[in-house]
């Protein structure tokens, strides 16, 4: 469903007429209009039962779409009440879309964006009084430029804007509203930048950024109320730039000879075809989401029906649902499997014992199934033709205000000349937003440049090997990873898929010095929960830490990676690091079979590229570690890992390795649940794991078989003391 909210009828009058929407009979103290396609909610069904059916009085029977439009009135209180009441009564659910549409006073424009009557998609919302900031998701590409919007409690009037500064004078009589603008003399707001700062307390550093700035009285309330019900990617804020407050209706005639309502309609209709086109795309997007929701609901119905046939308890029914999700992720023919059981007379089961036997047999059958290929070219083509295409990665770069103008920030921005730079007050305002769609964000990631405050270096986690190091720590330099591995715990650790890059490296160096003084030495993993090597061209984390090694003889650094990194080693060679520093810089390469790399480790270097980087690093004198961790289950795991080891033994002089690590996939219960919820089912999130003390792992027999096989093969080339195998005792 599509929910549209506007403050005034005149702001959406053209949409109501274009969509042939009819007025709705409701008890709410605001107006609503809807299309014929509007689906009746549960609330309506209850009203029907009570004999109080509400209806849409249509102007035409040919109306289309599934749109409910609400006129909420002016101000934040009206907006919050209308949005919350409507979404609650209509039982808004996953996939529903909200479009907030209306006019806004233009406070500041950038170049051509100063034209009145121009429509903007809002990328940031701020409350004028509290200073709180909210950020709508920027995933879908549109034809609209973006702008920042301030929400205040007062109607802006020309009389409010009268002020004098050293450089400019603003007066209610100096400029008149006009839809005409020439290149030589742009039509700007009579409020002006300086006037607005005096009225609303806006900080000068915000006004200096290259952002268009608008003002209204409802948007932050709409956002907060809507976000309690709907996901971020389904909230759209569209504003038409005007240069007056709607509250000036009593002012009557202005210099143009038109009333304010007439001028408002005229300005808002300049790009109405563009707005209609966008609304059409939103309707297509709504249809796509409805199909996805229907597919999910159909799957749950199938799972429930099958559980009833198997006579399963609630716990086993949930287990069956997980197994079916795993089967779906493999694209296996599980429906045919159970249909055959029906034909054999084994379904429906006569008792619970029979159902448990069928469930056990299905589990064994399922573990022998391989993933049935990747997405076809036809499916990929259909995905690229979606209603609203996604922005490419790093299309928008968010920068904390404290860092704006800094050399490091400017150097990064120059690498993305087409990216939109958006100032933010703190990275958590964006990164920790409610109801983010991490799976969708993975396809359109944004970059956040920030300063890390508080704790920056942490003790190693229990599920990671410490390699017998007493002072084993890791640094959080980058939140999230530029690669996307389907089994990565970061998907359950962070609410967002966007990357946060911390630029205050000197603070990290100070923390290292303090720990070295306290502990006597420090073993620091700087790429513990990310892959810094993959972003070295963007920001030289590894190079700068390599230089820091020369200053601290009691520091050792580990860089774990799935990247190739050839250019890095060439750059490190030019640094002329001492042999001692090279030995204390450990490059740990995670190695996986090529099939698993292609199926699950998206964006990473292939096995060939990683081994080439291993040899290059080894030739330069750096310390090398190979990590067969996590070892991942596959129906043909034994042959895949056999081929992997044969390639490694052939390409790498094993005697020159510092050590190797072995460990099968394991993850905390909380992370796995969050991964499944945020990213859906994959063979790595829906596998039928066992749970021991809050950690999911492969069934013990399978785990011992896999790890034991790998360790025995490695013992053919390495002494036992060079093989670190993760054990339960390490936790």
Image (tube, rainbow, N blue to C red):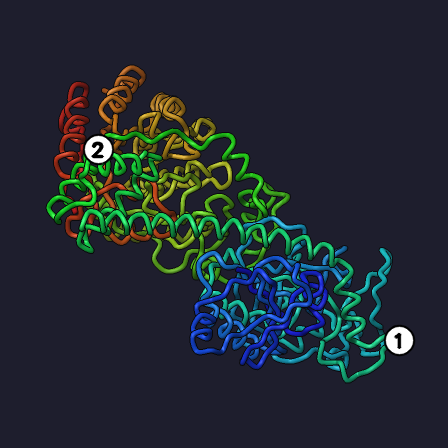
In the drawing, does residue 402 fall left or right of residue 593? right
What numbered label is drawn on residue 355? none
Query: Relative to 513, is 287 on the left or the right?
Result: right
Query: Sequence-wise, which precedes: disc 1 or disc 2?
Result: 1
Is residue 504 at all visible to an observer of this figure?
yes
Residue found 65% across the figure and 60% down from its top: 63
* Residue 704 picture location, percent across and down: 13, 33
Q: Which residue is depicted at the point 76% across and 62% down?
A: 269
Q: Helix, strand or loop at disc 1?
A: loop
Pick the residue in front: 345 or 465: 345
Q: For label 1, count other residues whose C-alpha is less than 10 Å away and answer few (under 14), some (14-19) or many (20+).
A: few
In this view, the residue in front, 67 or 101, is 67
Furthest residue in direction top, as rendered: 650
Q: In 3D space, how far apart are the residues under numbered discs 1 and 2 (Cα atoms)? A: 79 Å
Q: Quadrant of residue 188?
A: bottom right
**Where's residue 601, x and y in %?**
38, 34
Q: Which residue is mark 1?
A: 257
Single out the mark in the foreground, 1 or 2: 2
Q: Left of 417 or right of it: where is 460?
A: left
Asked whether the beta carbons under mark 1 and mark 2 sit within 8 Å of each other, the answer is no
| Residue 17 percent coordinates (x, y) | 71, 65
Circle 2 residue:
365
Q: Would you say residue 512 is visible in this rendering?
A: no
- Horizontal side, residue 149 vs residue 106: left or right: left
Along the viewing direction, whichever of 625 and 714 lies nearer the viewer: 714
Compared to residue 230, the image places residue 670 above or below, namely above
When asked about the image quadrant of residue 254, the answer is: bottom right
């Amino acid at each position: 469903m599509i929910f549209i909210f506007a403050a005034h009828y005149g702001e959406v009058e053209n949409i109501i007429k274009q969509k042939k929407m009819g007025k709705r009979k409701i008890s709410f103290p605001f107006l609503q209009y809807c299309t014929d396609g509007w689906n009746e909610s549960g609330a309506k069904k209850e009203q029907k039962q009570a004999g109080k059916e509400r209806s849409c009085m249509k102007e035409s029977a040919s109306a289309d779409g599934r749109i409910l439009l609400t006129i909420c009135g002016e101000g934040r209180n009206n907006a919050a009440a209308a949005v919350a009441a409507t979404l609650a009564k209509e039982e808004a659910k996953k996939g529903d879309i909200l479009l907030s549409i209306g006019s806004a006073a233009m406070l500041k424009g950038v170049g051509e964006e100063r034209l009145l009557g121009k429509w903007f998609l809002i990328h940031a919302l701020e409350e004028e009084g509290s200073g709180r900031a909210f950020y709508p998701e920027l995933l879908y590409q549109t034809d609209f430029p973006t702008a920042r919007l301030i929400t205040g409690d007062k109607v802006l009037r020309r009389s409010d804007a009268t002020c004098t500064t050293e450089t400019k004078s603003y007066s209610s009589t100096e400029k008149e509203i006009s839809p005409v603008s020439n290149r030589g003399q742009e039509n700007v707001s009579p409020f002006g930048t300086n006037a607005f700062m005096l009225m609303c307390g806006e900080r000068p550093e915000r006004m200096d950024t290259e952002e268009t700035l608008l003002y209204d009285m409802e948007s932050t309330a709409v956002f907060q109320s809507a976000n309690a019900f709907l996901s971020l990617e389904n909230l759209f804020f569209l504003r038409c730039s005007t240069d007056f407050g709607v509250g000036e209706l009593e002012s009557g005639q202005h210099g143009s000879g038109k009333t304010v309502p007439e001028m408002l309609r005229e300005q808002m209709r300049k790009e109405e075809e563009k707005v209609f086109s966008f609304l059409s795309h939103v309707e297509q997007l709504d249809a796509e989401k409805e199909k996805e929701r229907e597919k999910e609901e159909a799957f749950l119905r199938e799972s429930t029906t099958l559980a009833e046939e198997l006579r399963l308890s609630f716990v086993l029914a949930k287990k069956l649902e997980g197994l079916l999700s795993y089967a779906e992720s493999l694209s296996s023919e599980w429906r045919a499997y159970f249909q055959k059981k029906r034909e054999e007379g084994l379904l429906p089961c006569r008792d619970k014992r029979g159902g448990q036997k069928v469930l056990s047999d299905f589990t064994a059958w399922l573990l022998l199934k391989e993933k049935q290929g990747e997405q076809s070219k036809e499916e990929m083509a259909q995905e690229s033709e979606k209603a609203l295409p996604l922005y490419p990665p790093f299309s928008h770069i968010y920068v904390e205000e404290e860092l704006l103008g800094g050399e490091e920030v400017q150097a990064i921005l120059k690498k993305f000349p087409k990216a939109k730079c958006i100032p933010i007050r703190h990275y958590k305002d964006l990164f920790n937003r409610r109801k983010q769609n991490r799976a969708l964000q993975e396809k359109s990631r944004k970059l956040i440049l920030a300063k890390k405050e508080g704790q920056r270096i942490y003790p190693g986690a229990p599920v990671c090997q410490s390699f017998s190091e007493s002072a084993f720590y890791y640094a959080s330099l980058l939140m999230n990873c530029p690669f996307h591995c389907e089994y990565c715990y970061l998907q359950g650790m962070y609410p967002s898929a966007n990357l946060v890059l911390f630029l205050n490296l000197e603070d990290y160096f100070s923390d290292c010095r303090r720990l070295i003084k306290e502990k006597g030495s420090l073993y620091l993993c700087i790429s513990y929960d990310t892959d810094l090597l993959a972003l070295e061209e963007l920001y030289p984390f590894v190079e700068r830490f390599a230089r820091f090694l020369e200053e601290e003889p009691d520091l050792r650094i580990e860089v774990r990676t799935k990247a190739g990194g050839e250019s890095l080693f060439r750059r490190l060679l030019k640094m002329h690091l001492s042999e001692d520093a090279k030995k204390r810089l450990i490059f740990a390469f995670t190695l996986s079979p090529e099939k698993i790399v292609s199926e699950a480790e998206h964006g990473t270097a292939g096995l060939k590229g990683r081994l080439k980087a291993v040899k290059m690093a080894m030739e330069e004198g750096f310390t090398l570690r190979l990590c067969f961790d996590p070892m991942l289950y596959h129906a043909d795991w034994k042959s895949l890992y056999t081929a992997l080891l044969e390639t490694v033994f052939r390409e790498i002089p094993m005697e020159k390795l510092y050590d190797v690590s072995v460990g099968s996939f394991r993850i905390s219960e909380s992370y796995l649940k969050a991964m499944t919820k945020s990213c859906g089912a994959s063979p790595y999130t829906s596998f039928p794991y066992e749970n021991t003390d809050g950690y999911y792992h492969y069934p013990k027999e399978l785990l011992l078989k896999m790890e034991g096989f790998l360790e025995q093969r490695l013992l053919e080339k390495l002494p036992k003391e060079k093989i670190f195998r993760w054990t339960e005792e390490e936790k």
